[in-house]
Image (spheres, helix red, strand yellow):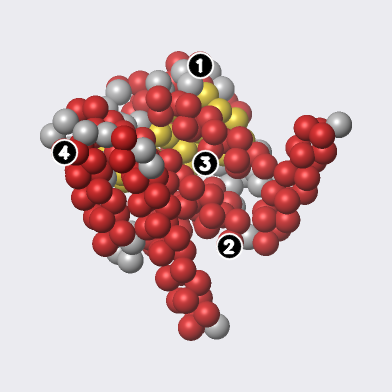
């Protein structure tokens, strides 16, 4: 019913905020005092924002991935490492998923794209011309593009069918980088939780695959 759905959504909000807080707090005690204070401030902001309606955007993005015929992920550099891990998680849910770390090579595979397929593009700044070109060509094949970028104006975000944003700002570049990676990972964790919660079949498949992996590790 409606009350249960709202309570369930509130629970997810709280878990997301706490997850972000935990990631931002990890190791903060070992940092110099001023950096630790900035990380704690970012943690408090994440908790304060946990109930913002932007969760609806994440739900729509998760729905697009869950109902896709196939999913492709693309990320470059550090973004590519996180995108590859997320692609592996999607595969555990039983979703047909491929990962690319080179937009040029991926462009050669666009002929396999079908209507309803989803391309998840992780790009911190979303400004690389080849990424924008790949996005438009994928949409020309009637696929859906979900972008994940910083919370700034950029071409990839502007032309995506759905966009997820990461807010991570600090005067010190090295601290800002830590905040970005922590927030990006937490965002994808949250989308993964939504995929499990909203599709019981996917969740059952996840448990089956995890049991298989565990059996292989123990054998």
**In the rendered image of this protein, does residue 104 appear above or below residue 10?**
above
Q: CA distance from mark 4 to mark 2?
A: 41 Å
Q: Which residue is mark 1?
A: 105
Query: Crowdedness of circle 1 by 10 Å Cα count: few (<14), some, many (20+)?
Result: few
- The residue lying toward the viewer, choosing from 65 and 173, is 173
| Marks 2 and 3 in Cβ contact (< 8 Å) | no
Q: Badge 2, how many Cα within 10 Å: few under 14, some, many 20+?
A: some
Measuring from the top left, give residue 190's x and y in whole percent: 47, 52
Mark 3 and mark 1 residues within 8 Å of each other at the beta carbon? no
Nearer the N terminus, badge 3 or badge 1?
Answer: 1
Report the disc number at residue 34.
Answer: 4
> How far apart are the two marked residues, 2 and 1, measured between alpha carbons?
33 Å
Mark 4 or mark 1: whose residue is earlier in sequence: 4
At which x and y percent is residue 148?
37, 40
For mark 3, give the secondary structure: strand
What crowding class fits label 3: few (fewer than 14 Cα within 10 Å), some (14-19), or many (20 or more)? many
Residue at position x 55%, y 83% in the image: 1
x and y, in percent, of residue 19 in the image: 42, 52
For the residues marked 3 and 1, what is the alpha-carbon distance in whole angstroms? 17 Å
| Badge 2 or badge 1: first in the primary sequence | 1
- Residue 7 is left or right of residue 17, and the answer is right
- Residue occupying image coordinates x 42% and y 70%: 10
Q: Earlier in the sequence, mark 2 or mark 3?
A: 3
Residue tagged 3 = 118
């Amino acid at each position: 019913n409606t009350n249960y759905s709202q309570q369930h959504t509130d629970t997810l909000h709280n878990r997301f905020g706490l997850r972000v807080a935990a990631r931002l707090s990890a190791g903060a005690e070992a940092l110099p005092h001023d950096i630790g204070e900035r990380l704690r401030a970012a943690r408090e902001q994440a908790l304060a924002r946990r109930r913002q309606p932007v969760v609806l955007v994440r739900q729509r993005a998760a729905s697009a991935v869950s109902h896709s015929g196939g999913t492709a992920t693309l990320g470059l550099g550090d973004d590519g490492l996180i995108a590859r891990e997320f692609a592996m998680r999607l595969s555990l849910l039983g979703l047909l998923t491929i990962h690319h770390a080179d937009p040029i090579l991926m462009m050669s595979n666009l002929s396999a794209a079908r209507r309803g397929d989803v391309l998840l593009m992780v790009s911190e700044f979303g400004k690389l011309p080849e990424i924008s070109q790949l996005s438009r060509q994928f949409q020309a094949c009637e696929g859906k593009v979900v972008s994940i970028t910083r919370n700034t104006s950029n071409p990839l975000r502007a032309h995506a069918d759905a966009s997820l944003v990461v807010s991570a700002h600090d005067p010190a570049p090295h601290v800002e980088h830590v905040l970005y990676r922590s927030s990006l990972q937490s965002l994808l964790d949250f989308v993964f939780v939504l995929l499990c919660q909203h599709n019981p079949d996917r969740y059952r498949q996840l448990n089956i695959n995890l049991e298989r992996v565990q059996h292989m590790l123990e054998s």
